[in-house]
Structures are given as C-alpha cells and as structure tokens.
Amino acid sequence: FSDGVIPNSPAAKLEPRPGMEMNAINFADQTRLYSHHPVFSKMPVQPLQVNRAYITEFTGLMIPAIYDCGPELIEGGSPTKSGLPGNYYSSVPSRWVDCNNLQSYVRSGQKWFFPSYPIIDEEYIEFASVMEVALQARVKLTVVEIGARWGTWGYRAIAASKAYNPSVLVYDVLFVEPELESCDAVREVASVNDWTLPTVNVTLLCSKANAQQVLEWVATRDFIDIFDIDCQGCEYQLFPTIIDALNAKVKRLVIGLHSQDSNVNRMLLQSLHGWTVVHSSDVLPCFTALGCQHILLENHKWDVQSQIQKKCGQCTEFSHPSLGPIINWDGELILDNPKFLDTPTFSDE
C-alpha cells in the first residue's frame, strides 16, 4: 500500500518504492497518491497504436473519439464537448483526461502510447467492480446494461475478458438505450472492435427500458454476471417487476441512483434483501447548485484542490476509505447476490 508520497519529491527519495506502477491518481485530491484496486494488478498493459479517431483503453477497447471528445478533436482541434447526449467530456474527469491525452499524442506525432489505468473519479469504483467480475467469469460472460450510451460497461467487460480471461469463449450482452444516436454508437463500437457472432452476441433494444422485454431476455439465460442499470430514474419503476429475476440469476448488480430523496433509495436497497452491499454512495445535491465537475474541468489552469475546498466543499462529503474524495453526479449501489458469493469481491471496506 502506498502512503501517497508524490514521486520525485524529497520524501520519495528516502527509500525504494516497490509497486509504484499500481499507484492511482485521484482527480479531486492531487496532494497525494492512492493505491489502485487489486484487480488492475492482474491486467498488465502493453503499448498500443495511436489512432486519432479512437480512444483506445488499456484493455484494447476502441471507442470512436467523437462520442466523448466531440468532432473538433478528430478535425485536429481541441476537444470541447461530447458528440453523444450527455456531455461526458465536461462532467467525467476520466473521459476529459482520455480526450486530452489523445490530443497530445496526435499533436506530438506519437505513433504508440502506453495506456494507463483509469484515474479515480465517479466511474472508478464501477470500472473496478466490472473488471473484477469479467475476470472471474468462466466459459461465458453475460451482461445486461440498461442505459447503455455507447455500450460503456457491457463493452468494457467484454474487452477486459477478451484481453485477460482466456477461459471465456462466448460473450452475451443486452443493451437497452432510448437515444437513437446512442443506439447507433452501440452498433458502431461492436463493429470497430470486430465483435460479431458467433463469439459476441449483442441484443440491442432501442427504446425506454421495458420490464417485460428485459424479463423475456433474462428468461432465456441461466446466469448473468453483471446487471448494470443507469437509466436516469427508471430504476425505481423497474425493480418491483424484475426483482425476482435478479435474485435468481444475477451475480453482481450495479445501480445508478438519481433521487435526492434518501428514503426512496433506502426503499430500493431494502427490496434487495440479503444482497451484499459492495459499494454505496448517495446523490449529492450540490451539483445542481454549484456544478462541481465543471469547476474541476473548466479552464484547468488553477489548483484543483483549492478550488474544490473553496467552491465545492460539501461535494467531497463522499470520501471513500481507500480512494479518497469522489465527486459524483449520481449515487450508486453495487451489490453481490449471496447465491453466487463463491469468489472474492470488490469492497468499500
């Protein structure tokens, strides 16, 4: 475990620092370093080729850069905002970093780059927990993602399993996404990564989440590794109908929370009686008032930490015990089904 001493500082020269490569950067607290989740130690990185049209993640997953970085980057300019609904470039630090890294590679004429693990932001815990299950899967990896955008978590799980888990031979994923632009993006990401039948089976429902459609798909599967739902509030309507199917078949459940009423979120958690809580965070109301993520990312010419303390102090009230302060738009629940607790899992402890 790192004590967070910044490399090249006087303290860093006092003794050898084994395992430095597994130190993580927390975008909201850059006064120290944190330790990566152990799952990343099982995922060694290799140099990858630079392609100005694509963000290429450390797993090898290729995503058209326009989706998170906007068209300006592709045309030789600077990224400004996402090309899909929901401006992830200006609201999620890890996407902002990926876009600006790609710009630097292109402008410097770099043909290869060493990919990095994700920085610590509101996506990090979900990223680690999805990677963990993808590496635990055997023979077949099955994922449901409701509120898919470009297929973020389903495709990240597939890419991780393909790169680091040779025991998985078949991939089966259901995406539900109401935005037509995002539906096209789900198809395109599968195409650019050359994921087709019979190895990768993608079912795409381009509509608002419908419990009956989801249940029909789930009924034809014996087991689901990851069920990820982030549908801007529809989770509260879906769960009473699908809870029995989740209890019977789902190993890990990831829920994006969108109500600022903690009682509503508590009732949802109570409906999952007996599930093991892996991670829990509430919706933080300060985002509607102060826009903390925008303060973090706009202009990026000032000291991040002092700005957070000055303008977004209450936003850092969610402080993970080992990852530090995490500024999140939405709340999140990650839970494990006790029926399938046969392998070690991510934990907030």
Image (cartoon, grey):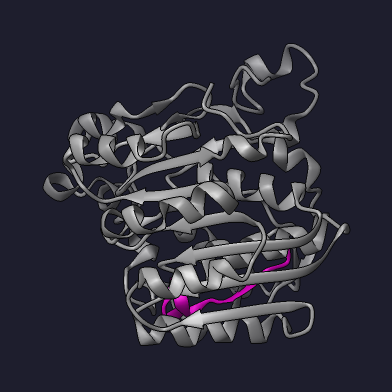
Residue at 46% from the left image edge and 51% from the top image edge:
244
Asked whether 65 falls inside the magenta stretch, the response is yes
Outermost left residue: 289
Q: Nearer the viewer, residue 13 or 79?
A: 79
Residue at 48% from the left image edge and 41% from the top image edge:
334
Q: Position of residue 25 (x, y in %)?
A: 55, 38
Outermost right residue: 166
Q: Quadrant of the N terminus?
A: top right
338 is higher (above) or lower (below) than 202: above
* Observer able to see residue 101: no
Residue at 65% from the left image edge and 87% from the top image edge:
191
Q: Nearer the viewer, residue 345 or 18?
A: 345
Q: Position of residue 286 (x, y in %)?
A: 17, 40
Q: Quadrant of the C terminus?
A: top right
Asked whether 80 falls inside the magenta stretch, the response is no
Q: Nearer the viewer, residue 224 or 230?
A: 224
* Observer able to see residue 32: yes
Residue at 75% from the left image edge and 73% from the top image edge:
111
Q: Position of residue 345 (x, y in %)?
A: 65, 34
The magenta stretch is: 59-73
248 is higher (above) or lower (below) than 325: below
Q: Is residue 185 left or right of residue 300?
A: right
313 is higher (above) or lower (below) than 268: above
